[in-house]
Image (cartoon, rainbow, N blue to C red):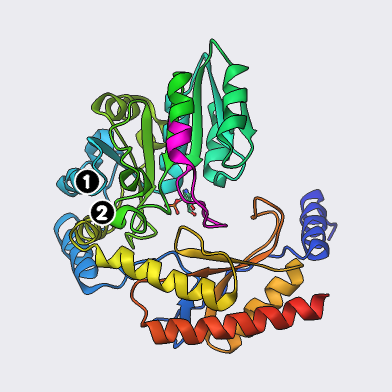
């Protein structure tokens, strides 16, 4: 049988990945009863398996069925979607919210619907892939500015006078765990009448007693700031949201293609996220526990503490990062392994996530193991 052009192309691409040390796999690491200590997931507050959240998911499933069955604009909007939107507003202090089926879709929806003809998009160089994809999907001119650099943004905005500019940043960055200088970014955007989209995927649940970094900095209610969020990290569920003023919600509901041409968020996910948002709003101690565990990890691993749950340990090569990760897995600890092209600065790293629901002695013990194994593999690669 002759080999098709596609077989050859797929084999070449696989070979390239092997050569670069960037092969990805999707192993099953959590069987439900696995004894591994999970310092890799984004379930920062441990709410994904919280009985209150699981029960709320069951209740929504029983009540509304397994699917929203249609786009939110057809028959897919359920009371639980509106209740969830209200709970997200109560948590973040934002006046209005629109729930999407993922955080990825929320970013696509926000940037494409808010840009359009006559607009340009500027992204922080470390912004999440979904924001970059959104900029591409907008079909409008887009560019990046230096990471966390309001002066560079100012220069880029000055060069775009006369355009409607949408600026997109994260509040706490997903890989390095550093936080954006939001007050300065707000000021720069304000002076150029630019719209600032802040992705709070890693801020909600962690900063501002769980209400997000904009809340912590007293920036909620700032004109021309729109928030995007995911329900799949601190809120332990699935889905995403765009938060802002009523006119912003109305505009997205009418024009955001990832909202219009997508089935509404599954009822169980909406029910779970609703319960989680209420828990986070009522219990500041969750965010405090994440920060305490994060400080323990960074101190023991000898790295600068990040602002978020993610603590990032640089490794000299992709192979050293993978080897450390595998050895940690064998020793009972799951950590993330980030390598190019998924790292904004090209540096491979172990990504260690602090979780609110882990006892501090377990976190400290695991952090010592991470430090020892990271050090060993750094030495081996030297
Ligand atoms: C900063 C950021 N934005 C958006 C997303 C996408 O969220 P979701 O997983 O809900 O699609 C992620 C998830 O990795 C993220 O880290």
Judge from the rendering whether residue 120 lies leftward or rightward of residue 344; answer left or right. Answer: left
Q: First in sequence: mark 2 or mark 1?
A: 1
Q: Nearer the viewer, residue 66 or 329?
A: 329
Q: Is residue 362 magenta?
A: no
Within 8 Å of ligand 1, the CB of disc 2? Answer: no
As measured in the structure, the alpha-carbon distance from the residue carrying label 2 to the one carrying label 1 is: 6 Å
Quadrant of the image for the C terminus?
bottom right
In this picture, is 348 found above or below 95? below
Q: Nearer the viewer, residue 376 or 114?
A: 376
Q: Which residues are magenta?
A: 170-186
Whether the residues at callouts 2 and 1 have beta carbons within 8 Å, the answer is yes
Task: Residue 49: give x, y in percent of width and height.
Answer: 30, 73
Judge from the rendering whether residue 169 lies leftward or rightward of residue 32; answer left or right. Answer: right
Task: Residue 330: give x, y in percent of width and height.
Answer: 60, 88
Q: Is residue 140 visible?
A: no
Q: Residue 270 shows which numbered tag? A: 2
Q: Main secondary structure of the magenta part?
A: loop
Pointer 1 residue = 81
The structure residue drawn at horizontal position 57% and vertical position 46%, both measured from the top left corner, is: 129
Q: Is residue 84 visible?
A: yes
In this picture, is 214 found above or below 46? above
């Amino acid at each position: 049988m002759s080999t098709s052009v596609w077989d050859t192309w797929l084999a070449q691409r696989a070979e390239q990945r092997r050569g670069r040390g960037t092969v990805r796999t999707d192993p099953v690491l959590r069987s439900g009863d696995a004894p591994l200590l999970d310092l890799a997931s984004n379930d920062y507050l441990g709410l994904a398996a919280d009985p209150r959240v699981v029960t709320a998911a069951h209740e929504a499933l029983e009540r509304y069925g397994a699917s929203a069955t249609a786009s939110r604009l057809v028959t897919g909007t359920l009371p639980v979607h509106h209740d969830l939107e209200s709970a997200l507003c109560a948590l973040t202090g934002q006046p209005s919210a629109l729930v999407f089926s993922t955080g990825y879709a929320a970013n696509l929806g926000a940037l494409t619907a808010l840009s359009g003809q006559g607009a340009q998009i500027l992204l922080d160089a470390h912004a999440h892939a979904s924001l970059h994809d959104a900029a591409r999907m907008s079909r409008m001119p887009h560019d990046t500015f230096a990471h966390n650099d309001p002066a560079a943004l100012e220069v880029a905005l000055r060069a775009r006078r006369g355009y409607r500019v949408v600026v997109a940043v994260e509040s706490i960055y997903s890989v390095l765990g550093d936080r954006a200088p939001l007050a300065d970014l707000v000021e720069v955007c304000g002076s150029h009448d630019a719209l600032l989209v802040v992705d709070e995927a890693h801020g909600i649940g962690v900063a501002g007693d769980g209400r997000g970094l904009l809340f912590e900095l007293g920036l909620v209610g700032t004109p021309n700031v729109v928030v995007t969020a995911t329900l799949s990290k601190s809120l332990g569920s699935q889905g995403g949201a765009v938060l802002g003023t009523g006119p912003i919600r109305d505009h997205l509901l009418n024009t955001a293609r990832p909202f219009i041409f997508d089935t509404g968020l599954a009822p169980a996910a909406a029910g779970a996220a609703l319960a989680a948002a209420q828990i986070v709003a009522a219990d500041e101690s969750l965010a405090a526990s994440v920060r305490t565990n994060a400080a323990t990890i960074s101190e023991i691993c000898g790295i600068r503490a990040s602002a978020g749950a993610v603590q990032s340990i640089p490794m000299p090569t992709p192979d050293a990062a993978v080897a450390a990760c595998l050895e940690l897995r064998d020793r009972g600890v799951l950590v993330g392994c980030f390598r190019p092209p998924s790292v904004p600065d090209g540096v491979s790293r172990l990504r260690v996530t602090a979780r609110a629901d882990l006892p501090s002695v377990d976190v400290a013990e695991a952090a010592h193991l991470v430090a020892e194994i990271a050090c060993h593999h750094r030495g081996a690669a030297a």
